[in-house]
Amino acid sequence: SYELTQPPSVSVSPGQTARITCSGDALPKKFAYWYQQKSGQAPVLVISEDNKRPSGIPERFSGSSSGTMATLTIIGVQVEDEAVYYCYSIDNSDNHRVFGGGTKVTVL
Amino acid sequence: EVQVLESGGGLVQPGGSLRLSCAASGFTFSNYAMFWVRQAPGKGLEWVSVIHSGGDGKYYGDSVKGRFTISRDNSKNTVDLQMNSLRAEDTAVYYCARDTVASASGDYGMDVWGQGTTVTVSS
């Protein structure tokens, strides 16, 4: 079955840059999406279609994709950005959707 | 306001059945594919199922295929998840979510999520 691979954790100091990667074989042809989930809350879409920022999402969040890897970048991390971030995409058959395992971002 | 609201969760014995429902409002429901996503306690997000906007295409994750059935009623703006032969590992918060794009087939992501309904499978 199709898998998306993320690092389990990333630690960053306030004001620094956090980069979270997501690797998957279908990503050259399929969009990646990124979700932020804070403890006890529903996920929130922060990046759509590789690099589109939905309304209301701060400009410090950006996305990119190249080859089999998508990346979520948070420039100038703030304490409130501490959360688990999940990538999401679809396999080449268009039948199965999948989330990455999630990356816990800790703001030190 | 665009929103979706799940209901129907609860405690069920292993091997039992439960039907979840999701009520949508604030958008043209019949234009959007809809999803179910779950999250086991302390675990990550898991895609469960998607149904096309017209109700014709339905797809399932491997862990629920053959046991769960997704359906929708575009006249009532609802999407349901019938869960049969439940197992302890189905214990999770179940979220309903809307496609990001008004497309038929749900080939995009999800932008509107409910707060979830909790399913506990235990004897």
Image: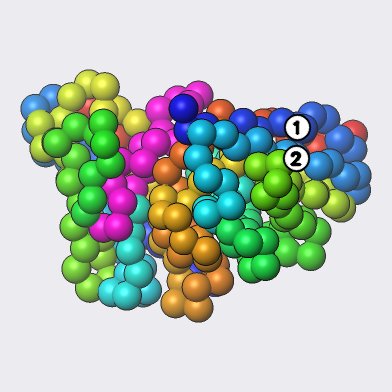
Residue B75, image x, y percentages: 70, 46
Q: Residue at x 86, y 35 (%)?
A: B12
Are there few (<14), some (14-19), or many (20+) residues within 10 Å of tag 1?
A: some
Kind of residue sitting beneath label 2: Leu
Kind of residue sitting beneath label 1: Gly
Q: Magenta segment: does it hold A36? A: yes
Q: Disc 2 or 1, which lies upstream in sequence?
A: 1
Q: The residue tagged with tag 2: helix, strand or loop? A: strand
Mark 1 sits on what residue? B9
Residue B51 appears at what percent x and percent y? 62, 59
Viewed as shown, does residue A92 lie left or right of A104? right
Asked if disc 2 and disc 1 are in contact, CB closer than 8 Å, the reply is yes
In the displayed structure, would residue A64 be above or below residue A58?
A: below
Give the residue drawn at x 35%, y 69%: A30
- Numbered mark located on residue A97 in the image: none
**The furthest residue to the top:** A79
The relative height of residue A5 versus residue B87 in the rendered view (above or below) is below
Chain ID, mark 2: B
To the question of a shared chain for discs 2 and 1, the answer is yes
Identify the element where label 1 is drawn. Answer: loop
Determine crowd level at label 2: few under 14, some 14-19, many 20+ residues with C-alpha closer than 10 A: many
> What is the total number of numbered labels drawn onto the structure image?
2
The quadrant of the rendering that contains the C terminus of chain B is top right
Looking at the image, residue A75 sits to the left or right of residue A92; the answer is left
| Residue B20 disc label | 2
Span of residues in magenta:
A34-50
